């Protein structure tokens, strides 16, 4: 049974709304990430980009709209989110089911050439430090020289005092934007599970299973250290609001 575009649009819109609850200045973060990808791929006739932990593909779709000649992959472990993305975004993206960090996970992307950019947003914090170290190494191997990895996520500052101030700044921003009034993660999934239009689909919400959340407490310098260790020549933050950072690593 296929999903109608109207049903997909409804659930993707709700997905984006609940994600706003968790990512401070989410749209600006997306814009910064797309700016980086556009900058580093300015001489590429058809950039190859993968969005890791893409969900339905919100970030991937924005990059595809910014770079119409690009080939953009949306990679996620959840089949329902991928199906929503396929129905909503159509052929603008190639959706791939993959568990990031699992053995051979990059092979599932079926890349035919080195990546120009790998991006992610509000996704990789669920990986443990050891898994993340390996993911960074594997990405460095698949990126072309000069290619980039760009990660927008909740990443704390190195100083405990600055960490506390940044969290307070983020909390106040969320309060001003009424972000906490938005639907939360559990509510979204409860609604998706109960919707007959979704429950009849393969990979339906009631059968979803995500990889175990290991989590990590890496600070900005912790991430930079792992990225340099993995083979990236340069790494650092290019944007921050509260504890929301965009880190860029150049192969």
Image (cartoon, rainbow, N blue to C red):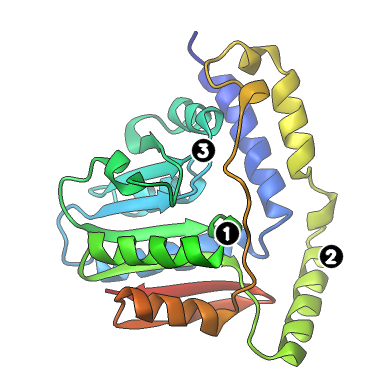
Residue 175 has which mark? 2
The circle on residue 39 is none
Residue 182: % across, % down: 79, 47
Q: How far is disc 1 from disc 3 in space, using C-alphas?
A: 16 Å
Left/right of residue 117 with respect to residue 171 in the rendered view: left
Residue at screen point 66% across, 49% down: 19
Marks 1 and 2: in contact by CB < 8 Å?
Answer: no
Left or right: 20 with respect to 246?
right
Residue at position x 78%, y 44% from top?
184
Q: Nearer the viewer, residue 239 or 160?
A: 160
Specify which label sits upstream in the sequence, 2 or 3: 3
Please tell me which residue is depicted at 63% across the width and 30% down the height of the picture. Answer: 11
Q: Quadrant of residue 174?
A: bottom right
Mark 2 surroundings: few (<14), some (14-19) or many (≥20) residues within 10 A = few
**Which residue in the protein does label 1 denote?**
27
Question: Whole-Å distance between the Cαs marked 2 and 1?
Answer: 17 Å
Query: Which of marks 1 and 2 precedes in the sequence?
Result: 1
Q: Nearer the viewer, residue 234 or 64?
A: 234
Q: Is residue 18 visible?
A: yes
How far apart in space, not on screen, are marks 2 and 3 (Cα)? 26 Å
Label 2 or label 3, whichever lies nearer to me, is 3
156 above or below 198?
A: below
| Residue 65 vertical placement versus 171 (above, below) | above
Local crowd size for mark 3, using a 10 Å CA cut-off: few (<14), some (14–19), many (≥20): many
Q: Which residue is mark 3?
A: 56
Foreground of the two, 45 or 211: 211
Secondary structure of the residue carrying tag 3 is loop
The kind of secondary structure element at disc 2 is: helix
Badge 1: few (under 14), some or many (20 or more) residues near its Cα, within 10 Å?
few
Q: Position of residue 69 (x, y in %)?
A: 22, 48
Residue 136 coordinates in the image, percent (x, y): 39, 66
Residue 219, quarter of picture? bottom right
């Amino acid at each position: 049974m296929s999903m109608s575009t109207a049903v997909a649009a409804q659930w993707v819109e709700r997905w984006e709304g609940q994600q706003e609850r968790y990512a401070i200045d989410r749209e600006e973060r997306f814009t910064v990430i797309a700016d980086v990808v556009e900058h580093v791929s300015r001489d590429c006739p058809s950039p190859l980009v993968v969005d890791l932990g893409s969900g339905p593909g919100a970030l991937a779709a924005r990059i595809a709209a910014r770079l119409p000649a690009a080939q953009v992959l949306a990679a996620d472990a959840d089949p329902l989110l991928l199906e929503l993305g396929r129905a909503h975004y159509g052929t603008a993206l190639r959706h791939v089911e993959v568990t990031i960090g699992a053995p051979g996970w990059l092979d599932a992307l079926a890349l035919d050439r080195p990546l120009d950019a790998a991006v992610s947003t509000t996704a990789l914090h669920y990986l443990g430090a050891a898994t993340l170290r390996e993911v960074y190494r594997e990405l460095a191997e698949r990126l072309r020289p000069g290619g980039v990895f760009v990660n927008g996520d909740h990443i704390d500052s190195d100083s405990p005092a600055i960490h506390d101030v940044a969290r307070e700044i983020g909390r106040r921003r969320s309060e001003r934007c009424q972000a906490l009034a938005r639907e939360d993660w559990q509510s979204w999934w409860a609604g998706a599970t109960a919707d007959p239009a979704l429950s009849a689909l393969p990979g339906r919400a009631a059968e979803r299973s995500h990889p175990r959340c290991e989590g990590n407490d890496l600070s900005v310098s912790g991430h930079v250290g792992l990225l340099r260790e993995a083979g990236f020549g340069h790494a650092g933050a290019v944007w921050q609001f509260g504890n929301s950072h965009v880190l860029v690593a150049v192969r």
